[in-house]
């Protein structure tokens, strides 16, 4: 059995999580403008401005992209360490 996790699964899951979180935060900012966090989104998402449909969809796309960036870095590192641990626990016999 191969140890490790799927890059595609983690990429889509993380990206969807960040896109949903972005959408919820925009909704929160619209409902509670005194507690708005859009200044943080402007710093984290290049080109994002408060608020137009184009900017909202750009923020969604960039949030989704950040999820894939995370997955592309984290999954291979995780899989390398998982393989090393599995090798230590079950060394190959000559």
Image: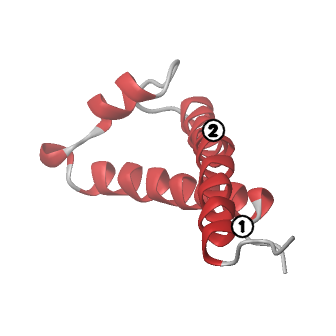
What's the residue at 58%, 48% (across, down)? 74
Q: Residues within 10 Å of mark 2 (few under 14, many from 20)?
A: some
What's the residue at 60%, 35% (across, down)? 62
What's the residue at 28%, 29% (across, down)? 39
Quadrant of residue 13 within the rendered picture: bottom right
SS state under label 1 = loop
> In the orientation shown, which residue stands out farthest toward the front?
94
Residue 61 rendering spot, x and y as whole percentages: 66, 39
Residue 31 rendering spot, x and y as whole percentages: 27, 57
Position of residue 23 in the picture relative to residue 68 (left or right): left
Residue 90 rendering spot, x and y as whole percentages: 69, 78
Q: Nearer the viewer, mark 1 or mark 2?
A: 1
Q: Which residue is mark 2?
A: 69
Q: Residues within 10 Å of mark 1 (few under 14, many from 20)?
A: some
Q: Is residue 80 above or below residue 3?
A: above
SS state under label 2 = helix
Locate the C terminus and report the quarter of the image it occupies: bottom right
Q: Is residue 51 above or below residue 83?
A: above
Q: Specify the label residue 4 is tagged with.
A: 1
Residue 21 rendering spot, x and y as whole percentages: 45, 57
Alpha-carbon span between mark 1 and mark 2: 18 Å
Task: Assess whether mark 2 and mark 1 are in contact (beta carbons under 8 angstroms).
Answer: no
Quadrant of residue 36 within the rendered picture: top left
Position of residue 51 in the picture relative to residue 59 (left or right): left
Most foreground residue, 8 or 51: 8
> In the orientation shown, which residue stands out farthest toward the left?
34
């Amino acid at each position: 059995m191969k140890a490790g996790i799927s890059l595609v699964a983690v990429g889509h899951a993380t990206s969807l999580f960040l896109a949903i979180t972005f959408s919820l935060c925009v909704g929160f900012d619209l409902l509670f403008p005194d507690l708005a966090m859009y200044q943080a989104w402007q710093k984290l998402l290049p080109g994002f401005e408060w608020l137009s449909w184009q900017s909202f969809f750009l923020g969604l796309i960039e949030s989704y992209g950040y999820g894939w960036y995370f997955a592309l870095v984290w999954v291979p590192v995780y899989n390398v360490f998982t393989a090393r641990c599995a090798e230590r626990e079950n060394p190959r016999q000559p």
